Amino acid sequence: MIPTALVEVDVVERWGEGIPAAVPVVDVDGEPDLGTAAESLDLDTATLRALDTSGKVGEVRTLPLSEGRLGWAVGVGDGEPARWRTAGGALARAVRARIGDSGGEGNDPEDLGDALDVEYVQFRLPAAATPELVSALTLGLALGEYHFKVSRRPAPPRLRKVLLVARQGEDTARLRTAARRAREWASATAVARDLANAPSNIKDPAWLANTAAAMAAPVPGLDATVRDEKWLAEHGFGGVLAVGGGSARPPRLLELTWGGADGTEAEHVVFVGKGITFDTGGISLKPAEGMEMMRTDMAGGGAVIGAMLAIARMELPVRVTALVPMAENHVSGSAYRPGDVVRHYDGTTTEVANTDAEGRMVMADALGYAVRDHQPDLLVDVATLTGAMKVALGLRTGGVFSSDERLGERVREAGRRTGESWWPMPLSEDHAADVRGTTADVKQAGQGPGGLMAALFLREFTGNLAWAHLDIAGPARADKAYDEVVAGATGFAARTLVEFVAGLGD
């Protein structure tokens, strides 16, 4: 079911009797502060010590409380804000596992009634909790137990809400605002995960576009338009049509527009997200190993869609347009070929070298369309574009190429505030000539550093506007849980986009 239901998080002032409880354990000079944790749970430190309770970040211990209740002690290390995201994710997974052990997922449907009643948990915040701490903890709690599964079984019991209990005298309203903002970030991330995780036998371009439009419909002020293959052909979207030509399921272009809650004349931002619903590589066929994860090759488009929904729900006073070109890159007699010359929306021609470099082909059309028809002040594109970025930055950091140093820094700073890691990449002019074509204006996959060559190719379609290209090939997918991330699609970049836009309205 899309969108996936997430854990609700709120900040309250009163510790409740009879509610399952969790407390943080901070490391002080290398030793866990068991006294504070024990006092909050009305336990003695000997019990915590006997259970090997630790302050190690993300280490969770299940504790027996009075009246048969359960509690949890969660290590937060030195207590820096980023540690709380890890702790929140670990606690959410521990509670989910406990529900499963007592009759949840994996058991027969008729046994679900025996599941442990932990729909609500209260969590004791430390003294002098900051909005940054609450934001990080909220992200971990909301996203850490995210679960996407297509199954005949009924949905298992789950943790529904966590109450963050502030200390007496804290600015509860300020902390509550931080939690609500982070919950919107989490929602954007979860939508991006949902769309990317959806299996590609269901998720063709039409399904993806229509599903996004359906989610946008009930959000006041957020308008969605879906362009079909006939419209794309009439308007000269040669890159999208070439990539989608090998599939029996035709391409689409999704447009989402948010004009700002107060009709502001703020900077107009256009997001472009890669929407390849499945990528075989085309004639330049990928290896079979790992190809099943190519259902997530539209993770950039998913991030853009999730971000737009959150931006509109938050009623941010900004102007944003999102363009998501969608296609399935398949192998057939009608597939595009290496050596083809393709004409894009803005008239630029591209010499095709590798049909597996399809993302930049569809995004070139969308960027050209953005420049010509939407007159933005800023362009930001997001894509799982090059395997080279995984080599350069690993699997937890996105790369930022930008024609404007200040724009690139604004993106990275938004990521820092929302717990997403970005690294500035050089947009070297030394290789600019390598994207020039011999039989066309530009070359799709010139010789040179893979991530850089893709970025330089896309720059050709940005009309010299301030532009940032976000390559998320590494962090868009995960093979194991960490922090607030679970295995599968991560939703990376969605909340960075939301916070980036929020900063424009300041």
Image (cartoon, rainbow, N blue to C red):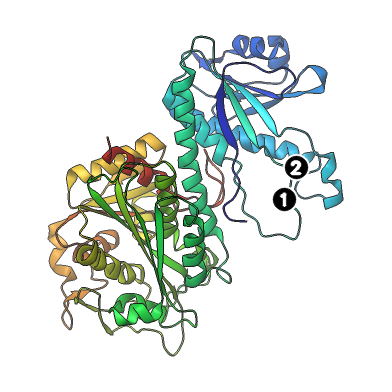
Asked which quadrant contains residue 19, the reply is: top right
What residue is pinned by disc 1?
155
Q: In the image, residue 294 lies at what x, y percent?
A: 49, 66
The kind of secondary structure element at disc 2 is: helix
What residue is pinned by disc 2?
100
Horizontal relation, residue 153 to residue 187: left or right: right
- Res 112 visible: yes
Find out whether the residues at labels 1 and 2 contact each other: C-beta distance under 8 Å: no
The quarter in which the C terminus is drawn is top left
Front residue (pair 337, 506): 506
Residue type of the residue flagged with mark 1: Ala
Q: How far apart are marks 1 and 2 (CA)?
A: 12 Å
Q: In the image, residue 271 lies at what x, y percent?
A: 32, 56
Residue type of the residue flagged with mark 2: Gly
- Which circle marks residue 236 in the picture? none
Q: In the image, residue 321 lies at what x, y percent?
A: 32, 56
